[in-house]
Structures are given as structure tokens and as C-alpha cells.
Image: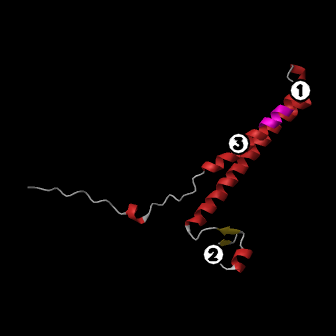
């Protein structure tokens, strides 16, 4: 994977897979966290779609028809549309992903000293 900063040379920008708009080095961490969160959402959506198909396709085929459980084509189409909506809504949850590093700035990492007692 190649990363380039938008203010970099044209050669670096052309050869990079990802071009960062800012010169802030924390953007690299944000980019990696965003890619990890995106991958997790892809896996979740894959499992959702697979689970839907594992349940709905046999029902539509009539596997449970002898016991009175059958899925009409209209209900199957409605469930497929609902599945698409659920996958899209799940993907929208990426907007709330925490991309900031957990490391506190140096000023916040300094140990706090106990206040000294003042005697009069």
C-alpha cells in the first residue's frame, strides 16, 4: 500500500494507492482505522446476506411446505428488499466510527503531582 501527502511530488501522488489531503501524520492512523472498520462492516454485511439466503432460499423452495410453512414470491421479494436496506443501514454506521488514536497528547500524559499543603 502506498500513501502520499497531497502536497507531495506528482510522482509520489501518481504512484500512491491513497493520497492524504492534509499533511497531518495522524491521517495515516485514521486511514488505517477506517480501512479496518470498513473490512469489519464488509464481513458483517456478508454474514447478514448469507444468513438471509440460508433461511429464505429453502423456504422459497418449499422445503418446509409439508408442515405448512411456505414463502410466497412476494414475501421473498419483500425480504430481499429489506435485506438490502439492512445492509445499507449497517454500512452507514461507518460514519460514527472512532478514527482518532487512543494516545493522549503529551501535555495530558504528564503525571499529576499532588498539591502541596500550605501551613500558616
* Residue 58 sits in quarter: top right
Label 1 – label 2 distance at C-alpha? 58 Å
Residue 11 circle label: none
* x 66%, y 71%: residue: 3
Start-end of magenta stretch: 77-82
Depth order, front residue of 24/70: 24
- Residue 89, disc: 3
Residue 7, numbered circle: 2
Q: Is residue 93 shown above or below 17? A: above
**Residue drawn at 70 percent across, 42 percent down:** 89
| Helix, strand or loop under label 2 | loop
Which quadrant of the figure has residue 30?
Answer: bottom right
> Could you tell me residue 27's position as x and y percent?
59, 65
The answer to which quarter of the image holds residue 4 is bottom right
Q: Are marks 1 and 3 in contact (CB under 8 Å)?
A: no
Q: Is any atom of residue 100 visible in this view?
A: yes
Question: Which mark sits nearer the N-terminus, 1 or 2?
Answer: 2
Residue lying at the far top of the rendered structure: 68
Q: Is residue 98 left or right of residue 79?
A: left
* Mark sitting earlier along the chain (2/3): 2
Horizontal side of residue 105 vs 58, given as left or right: left
Residue 80 forms part of the magenta stretch: yes
Q: Which quadrant of the rendered structure holds the C terminus?
A: bottom left
Amino acid at each position: 500500500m502506498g500513501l502520499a501527502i497531497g502536497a507531495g511530488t506528482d510522482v509520489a501522488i501518481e504512484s500512491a494507492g491513497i493520497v492524504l489531503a492534509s499533511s497531518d501524520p495522524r491521517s495515516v492512523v485514521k486511514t488505517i482505522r477506517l480501512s479496518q472498520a470498513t473490512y469489519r462492516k464488509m464481513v458483517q454485511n456478508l454474514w447478514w446476506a448469507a444468513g438471509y439466503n440460508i433461511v429464505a432460499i429453502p423456504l422459497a423452495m418449499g422445503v418446509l411446505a409439508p408442515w405448512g410453512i411456505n414463502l410466497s414470491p412476494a414475501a421473498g421479494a419483500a425480504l430481499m428488499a429489506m435485506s438490502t436496506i439492512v445492509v445499507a443501514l449497517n454500512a452507514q454506521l461507518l460514519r460514527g466510527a472512532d478514527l482518532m488514536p487512543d494516545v493522549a497528547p503529551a501535555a495530558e500524559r504528564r503525571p499529576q503531582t499532588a498539591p502541596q499543603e500550605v501551613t500558616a
